[in-house]
């Protein structure tokens, strides 16, 4: 079941992000979203049997949006959870009147790139040395009118 992030999820999300990405958006950012201090951020989790299987965050204003972070736990991969989370956010963002969604992805993350392309995202450009380890990011974009 996909639902909005709740306070009880934050510690799990931060720990999972650190394990998967080596860093996290942080407790404060997630908490500030729930308190309304960061009203442009929106986070969702996929939960089953009280276990968070994946999560996604998106920032958006009136016209543009950007995927902030997105993961599916290793034990839950290849079960279409990532696709469900992405489709949920795409619908949520475009139904809010936003025209575009962008995201960054590591060039070697071929599973993620395949998913993004399947959902209609197109490669836009390379952002050099984007990640903390110096790796480039590939920027993908989805336009509402492409769907």
Image (tube, grey):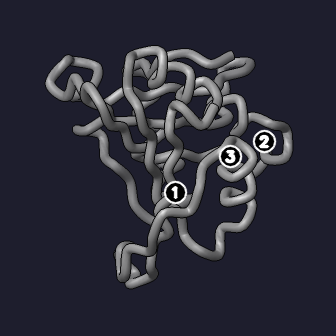
Residue at label 3? Answer: 73
Mark 2 vs mark 1, foreground winner is 1
Where 34 sits versus 38, above or below? Answer: above
Q: Secondary structure at mark 1?
A: strand
User: For the residues marked 3 and 2, what is the alpha-carbon distance in whole angstroms?
Assistant: 5 Å
The residue at the point 79 percent across, 47 percent down is: 77
Where 55 sits versus 133, above or below? Answer: above
Pointer 3 and pointer 2: residues touching (CB < 8 Å)?
A: yes
The residue at the point 44 percent across, 36 percent down is: 57
Graded by Cα atoms within 10 Å as few (under 14), some (14 to 19) or many (20 or more), the crowding at tag 3 reads: some
Pointer 2 and pointer 1: residues touching (CB < 8 Å)?
A: no
Where 19 sits versus 71, above or below? Answer: below
Q: Is residue 97 left or right of residue 63?
A: right
Pointer 1 and pointer 3: residues touching (CB < 8 Å)?
A: no
The residue at the point 40 percent across, 16 percent down is: 96
Graded by Cα atoms within 10 Å as few (under 14), some (14 to 19) or many (20 or more), the crowding at tag 2 reads: few
Residue closer to the observer: 35 or 135: 135
Residue at label 2? Answer: 76
Q: Is residue 60 left or right of residue 124?
A: left
Query: How many numbered discs, if any?
Result: 3
Mark 1 vs mark 3, foreground winner is 1
Q: Which mark is residue 90?
A: none
Q: In terms of sequence position, does the residue under pointer 1 or pointer 3 come before the other? A: 3
Q: Position of residue 136 (x, y in %)?
A: 44, 79
Q: Position of residue 144 (x, y in %)?
A: 51, 31
The C terminus, quarter of image: top right
Q: Position of residue 141 (x, y in %)?
A: 49, 50
Residue at label 1? Answer: 140
């Amino acid at each position: 079941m996909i639902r909005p992030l709740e306070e009880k999820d934050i510690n799990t999300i931060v720990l999972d992000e650190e394990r998967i990405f080596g860093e996290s958006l942080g407790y404060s950012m997630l908490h500030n979203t729930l308190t309304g201090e960061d009203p442009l951020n929106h986070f969702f989790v996929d939960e089953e049997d009280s276990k968070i299987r994946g999560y996604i965050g998106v920032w958006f204003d009136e016209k543009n949006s950007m995927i902030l972070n997105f993961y599916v736990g290793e034990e839950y991969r290849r079960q279409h959870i990532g696709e469900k989370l992405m489709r949920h956010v795409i619908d949520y963002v475009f139904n809010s009147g936003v025209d575009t969604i962008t995201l960054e992805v590591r060039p070697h993350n071929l599973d993620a790139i395949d998913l993004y392309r399947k959902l209609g995202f197109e490669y836009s450009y390379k952002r050099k040395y984007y990640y903390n380890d110096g790796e480039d990011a590939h920027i993908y974009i989805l336009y509402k009118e492409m769907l």
